[in-house]
Amino acid sequence: LSRLLSAAHSPSSLLSPLDTFTDRHVGPDEREVSHMLSQLGYESMDAFVAATVPSKIRVASAAVSNESIPSLSESELHRRARELGKLNTPVKSYIGMGYHNAVVPPVILRNIMESPAWYTPYTPYQPEIAQGRLESLVNYQTMIMSLTAMDIANASLLDEATAAAEGMVMAFIAANQKKRTFLVDSGVSPQTLAVLRTRAKGFGIHLVIGDVFSALKDEAISSDLCGVLVQYPDVNGDIKDFGSIADTVHGAGALLVCASDLLALTMLKPPGEWGADIALGNSARFGVPAGYGGPHGAFFACTDKLKRKMPGRLIGRSKDAQGNPAYRLALQTREQHIRREKATSNICTSQALLANMAAMYAVYHGPVGLKRIAEKVSALTQILKSLVEKHGYKATNANFFDTLTFDVTGAVKDADAVHASALASGINLRKVDEKHVGVTLDESVSAEDVVSLANVFASAASGSPVSASDLALPASLALPAALQRTSGYLPHPVFNAHHSETEMLRYIYHLQGKDLGLVHAMIPLGSCTMKLNSTSSMIPLTWPEFGGVHPFAPTDQVKGYAQVIKELEEDLCKITGFHACSVQPNSGAAGEYAGLSVIRAYHESRGEGHRDICLIPVSAHGTNPASAVMAGLKVVPIKTHADGNLDLDDLKAKAEKHKDKLAAFMITYPSTFGVFEDGVADACKIIHDNGGQVYLDGANLNAQIGVTNPATCGGDVCHMNLHKTFAIPHGGGGPGVGPICVAEHLAPFLPGHPVVPTGGSQAIDAVAAAPYGSASILLISWAYIKMLGGDGLSTASKVALLNANYMAHRLSEHYTLRYKNGNGRVAHELLIDLAEFDKAAGLKVTDFAKRLQDYGFHPPTCSWPISTCMLIEPTESESLEEIDRFCDAMIQIRREAEDVITGKQPKDNNVLKNAPHPISVIVLPEDQWNRPYSRQTAAFPVPWLLERKFWPTVSRVDDGEYFVLTYECRAATHLLVL
Amino acid sequence: LSRLLSAAHSPSSLLSPLDTFTDRHVGPDEREVSHMLSQLGYESMDAFVAATVPSKIRVASAAVSNESIPSLSESELHRRARELGKLNTPVKSYIGMGYHNAVVPPVILRNIMESPAWYTPYTPYQPEIAQGRLESLVNYQTMIMSLTAMDIANASLLDEATAAAEGMVMAFIAANQKKRTFLVDSGVSPQTLAVLRTRAKGFGIHLVIGDVFSALKDEAISSDLCGVLVQYPDVNGDIKDFGSIADTVHGAGALLVCASDLLALTMLKPPGEWGADIALGNSARFGVPAGYGGPHGAFFACTDKLKRKMPGRLIGRSKDAQGNPAYRLALQTREQHIRREKATSNICTSQALLANMAAMYAVYHGPVGLKRIAEKVSALTQILKSLVEKHGYKATNANFFDTLTFDVTGAVKDADAVHASALASGINLRKVDEKHVGVTLDESVSAEDVVSLANVFASAASGSPVSASDLALPASLALPAALQRTSGYLPHPVFNAHHSETEMLRYIYHLQGKDLGLVHAMIPLGSCTMKLNSTSSMIPLTWPEFGGVHPFAPTDQVKGYAQVIKELEEDLCKITGFHACSVQPNSGAAGEYAGLSVIRAYHESRGEGHRDICLIPVSAHGTNPASAVMAGLKVVPIKTHADGNLDLDDLKAKAEKHKDKLAAFMITYPSTFGVFEDGVADACKIIHDNGGQVYLDGANLNAQIGVTNPATCGGDVCHMNLHKTFAIPHGGGGPGVGPICVAEHLAPFLPGHPVVPTGGSQAIDAVAAAPYGSASILLISWAYIKMLGGDGLSTASKVALLNANYMAHRLSEHYTLRYKNGNGRVAHELLIDLAEFDKAAGLKVTDFAKRLQDYGFHPPTCSWPISTCMLIEPTESESLEEIDRFCDAMIQIRREAEDVITGKQPKDNNVLKNAPHPISVIVLPEDQWNRPYSRQTAAFPVPWLLERKFWPTVSRVDDGEYFVLTYECRAATHLLVL
Ligand SMILES: Cc1ncc(COP(=O)(O)O)c(C=O)c1O
Ligand SMILES: Cc1ncc(COP(=O)(O)O)c(C=O)c1O
Ligand SMILES: O=C([O-])O
């Protein structure tokens, strides 16, 4: 809050940096803070915090201060990021293993990845103000369906390894959890295997790894088989005819799951054409930077039969109130919220931004362009093979696309000789074993690069070097005739129209114009902490020094990343009060799962592996029970009081009842009702007294920093949503990062990784494909923390509390505030109950939400955690002006509701029920304008909308009916032609 | 046109790069090209070109090919730009002299400078679809008025030096061109002096340089005085009380012109408070990168009395058809179009984008923030002085703000010792002379930097180093009490509301949402060549390696820039067929002026300095005669035939008549009517035969590349608008670059520079402040040319011709095409005549233009070069789909016009007259919807608008009445509060 203060002639301010971040991040300035405090009746911020946060769990103000976390100005941060970037050695990677040097079309880089219009919006749960991203995600789904030839595809999962784990669980469920053997081909990538291992454990699935062709002949396997996972092409580059096992697998009542590669599928017979039930993989090679492992985004597609079991988000087509087609989320939307402990997947935040980038990449290149890329990669790989084999190396691959594994024994002493030669040329190859070296080519590889590569091998074998003129095109493809793709793909207009940069740019802008993001207005979604994603923290992300790094690069080449990760982990430990951190989980839900798995491993290490009960309040976020189930725990719900607080008696009773089997207790703090419960420390004590561990869901950490922390509350482990509290943009539904911090006794169990050593001494297996998860976006949170410093972080939390309380204060005169503490204070969010309007006039939460769209706001979280409520979280980044504007809108809507209650407006035809009002409705001819209010009232109910209005592009989207756009119907409807 | 072809399995395409630029830059693909050719009745592109371009002036297709200009793929370009960037040594500059290390707020960098929404729009001549930029430019004007305390300010000039020259000419004009002495204080920067010298020559102004205080006592000076230019603070850092000479200057009937510094004015008594008539300066220190000299943007402000003489663009406030306030260009809009040879300034393209950045910088910091910055800079400068003086150096400044000049003789042998010490620390200081060294501080300088700086001096003098703890804040300011600012500034709400990044970002997006740019639709402005500004060419621009370079950095530190400039100059010579190039002119008009000045110098060198007649066709762009006048030439107009061609007889007659005094002939080719005239070579011969030189206005060069060139046409010199043909974005009204290419005999006269040697052996004085003009954006054209290569450049021109001819073909069935060649072909643009509609139904060009806005298009150039016409230029970047969409819109409007002609719609109340229709009109209540057509017809006359519509934000803006927003009325109306 130094914006005004610092203008004073204080000597230190004249010598200190001018571009301090706290002033820019925190919305209200000093005057506005004073105003809000005085409206609430407090003399000081301290007095306000004292009334808001229970004293039992307060931490000293020095806990998170500039002493513990010094602050850097924006330009200092920039310089420091540059220095760290230089510590990452630029080495060209041919490591492969599912990660490529993607070529990001510059128009997509700058106008999607670097554009706040695309990275700031929320998950498109409000379809009327999200048709742009919804269309783009439909493009993604269509592209996946088309390339895989599967019936249906979702709008992204976290990464290939977790997608494979989801596939495994689907197979297990499809077999009614009766058959427990899941067979994995030995050609599957090690990181996928590791994540399968972790996940199999929770579900009690029996993993068998081996050659699928022979393993299937084993009766012991086939009789208990629920599914088979193959990789196509496999990690060594081989392309096998897995279609030949499809009948056997199906005959055994099992599913055939195929991990694949989108680029290869432009040339290979797709899994949908040879009997796969599920196809999945990483879509990052379609224009998403390597970024030291992520964020990337995995695709997931299956047969029509399986669609209702598919995890993740699916976009379908429905219609709006005028009967016009409109996209919306469909099927398992927030599955875990509904199914809770019956869920088998906890996926929530996924990889929307990266899925959009990949979809746009396909729009930009089209089928012809993609084919061209694949053919070049494939041809260069063939050329490389023949050049390398001249020196006595032998490729082990019969058929291949872009990856070769060379047996080096005919040419050199061991693989090290080749790796040394490569490194001398600034090249990384895959370290397979002593005798084998792997090479993977990609779109970024030029003919000159192939010459350099060939010479790496030549030089190691003391052979004579080749030059560009030695490159001769192969006579035929290295793909087996039977596995060559004959079917077309991507015939849809959208993939065949926007190939000039001008058209592409306009398509991007056309879509973004339909979507409301933080660039337009507050997105006060409770539990989601939609705060400023500052430019300074976003800039380093797309520097090649960070974007171009392979996750399995030798650790001495990634010292910049190592330092960023180390500093971030340390700072997160300071903030949470914990001892150690793992940044591997790539979403909040993944963090929950990782944390619970750590708890299980801890119990096991003490011979208490039988502890499998997890207590979870009924008010918990749906991911909590879902994660518990995935970690092999049994969920026992705990009641909450009518005032929103945890029922400590119930907790005590259940804890004692399950004393011997108590594994964990999961609690969100402040609660999902937005209250700092007094009893949190007591609750934790109860758990510990009964042998359990406490998992603190840190989604609401933004309320805590500098005033309390999860350790002080009594937790043993917590996850954080870096995409909430620590300013990673929501990306329209991801990416996210869900690191976990743990107390000292849990540190040994933090997740490991099969390729790059991470985690504790008794590490659980990996929970994500990459060793540091979505590594590149860790830079954002690192920068956020460094720029705010401890003081700024604490200020941010306090202002977040203040903004919410000021809003509660204003709104409580017009609406029923559902929960508050003894002093009348809420935490960082507030829950208002709209039940009375339903009773009085049939007005639902949705009607209020949709009407808010007409006022230019994104509605708050609706009907969660209570169906009749709205959960509103303004965050610290919103200014008083914006908050007042929002309150004014809510109050005006309250008046509009009153008109319905009093009968001034009919119950079935009023501004709320008919909301939102897009322009297509506003222009209706007079004879169709059958509404008892004017167009102005519909569109401009308050004067400031005349100057500043965001328009929904469709009217209310039907949330009942929808249909899923399969490959064919999409092509047929031509919905996407501009 | 390789997009589809290259998909074939041609061996070379499999080995060559995939990310070739021509495919992305050129809108139509091969199929679309074929379609257009067949519609026009040609079998091949060659046949089409043969029918379009006169054979006499055709060049061999090898003239501009990949042989002469090899092409780089997008990623190769990126790598090459990186390499060149590394050749610019990173040295911290304290050189000053009007150039600073600006700190660009990241939110502005990314969302304005790097955003196509801001850099692609055209100059806001269509106010209904440009209210965003207009508001921002009003912010700029307001900021300038407020900080200078002048009555009125314009929306930017090119740079401080040319702004000073405009000030000088205004003074000369104000004195009715009777008094010829212009006195310049010796504290004025050398580059300003150099440009004044050039400009004084053309107007016959007598420049006197010296100490103004004593010079004014000279009767010879004061009796002939038209104006005085002072610099405040001056180039050496001194702050003098020029208010003391105001009465004397005014008493002599002259104007007092003050070059100043915006940051200093936050602390210094502003020029408007001590009698200056004009205040001007560079506004780049408000958040615009140094960029090796530009583009920057100069401000220009004057007293109310002088406002009608003020050059450049001025935004005023008017009202729209509903009576709502709306901004629009006012006063001297394209003065030169109206006044032609009576004009005294040729400014056309200015620096809109950079003015917007500077305005946004003030919005972001507000008065309090700006003051804080100034106070810090000032305090650190004082600290530096005391630290340095400890070692025997002596500052020559009595009063100073941010700049010190040290006499080094008391400490070291000579200045070189200090410069050597500086360089060893990676620091550049100003080289004043043997005994003096200059230091200028700015916003980027930290306390640590001051320590390093002090130690440069200490070390040179073998003194003991200081450390941070030695920094003590000065007790008082170094500004003389009488010159300290006491008045406030920037009280306007807009400068006091958007200080958090969230608010700032939303303000930027709010404004950009009102403006139509290339991100939305075609901007088919004849003569303006609004083509794709590719992301690849924009990216390097904002790398610090290019952005952070001072224009006067020693040449051995700027080898990267040198290489870019050399390659660009060479390529431009290849393209034009000329011998040498100067990139110094920073707009097309500046290029004209430079070229004509070179011609004059050439004549002088041959003892023919008396040649002062310039023949100019009546159809020429208004800048041509204006530039001629500025270069001291007398304009003789040449007729054109009814068919648009030059009247060769008239040309011959006039050339012969003025044989002895003929200096030059200016011609635009293809003509401003969009036709390749057959007679161009003959015309040039006539001029040469009569002793004149031919100036070819290259605004239309996009029609020529690879098919003809200015040298082949017979020219001696031409300018190019890099912001047209070579893809520098128009920036909403600038920046631009207008380099000139010349034949060998003119090369010696290319413009020089007083600080950094440039130009020929007999160089004319500088025409711009920086040696290479707007150096940083040269990167864009360099990249554009390198990525297309010669083949791509030729293809681009041919497709530009084809697109225009296809459009002419489609439209000529519905509209009167005014000019075409014998084969029925136009060049790269087409002129349609709407006179018949005025006659038949009173429908004017404007009515058609405004109606086009309703269809989502930016109107073409209107009423120029013929008042009843539209000049339409699609460029090569538009796809067939977009061109057809535009034609469909025009044809539909033609039908709408027919309804007026036939009386179906009243003459005074119809969709054309009432256009455009913003939403505020569409929602009018029924009783106010007094129109004989429906809301749908108004807003959605064709179905594709339902999906893709750009909304004008105001209805038709009155182009008669307006008022200029002075400082006070602006503050009072609060127009900008959101
Ligand atoms: C309380 C709570 N816990 C967990 C999560 C899950 O986080 P993620 O969406 O990153 O998986 C959320 C997300 O909204 C949440 O609000
Ligand atoms: C034919 C012609 N000449 C000269 C110019 C002046 O160029 P600039 O605006 O860059 O000064 C223009 C600009 O529109 C033009 O069209
Ligand atoms: O599920 C949520 O993303 O809140």
Image: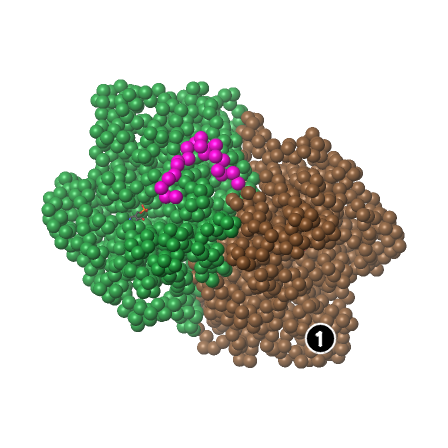
Chain colours: A brown, B green
The structure residue drawn at horizontal position 14% and vertical position 39%, both measured from the top left corner, is B610
What kind of residue is marked 1?
A: Ala
The structure residue drawn at horizontal position 29% and vertical position 56%, both measured from the top left corner, is B836
Q: Is residue B962 magenta?
A: yes
Q: Position of residue B341 (x, y in %)?
A: 23, 42
Residue under mark 1: which chain is it in? A
Task: Count neighbours of disc 1 (C-alpha within 10 A) and say few if under 14, some if 14 to 19, many if 20 or more.
Answer: many
Q: Taking A862 as reference, is A805 above or below it?
A: above
In this picture, residue B192 sits left or right of residue A973? left
The structure residue drawn at horizontal position 68% and vertical position 68%, both measured from the top left corner, is A308
Image: magenta residue range = B958-978
Q: Is residue A251 magenta?
A: no
Q: Is label 1 within 8 A of ligand 1 (CB to nearest ligand atom)?
A: no
Residue receiving disc 1? A254
Question: In which quarter of the view is residue A629 placed?
Answer: bottom right
- Tag 1's secondary structure? loop
The structure residue drawn at horizontal position 75% and vertical position 45%, both measured from the top left corner, is A818
Q: Position of residue B774 (x, y in %)?
A: 36, 44
Q: Position of residue B327 (x, y in %)?
A: 42, 42
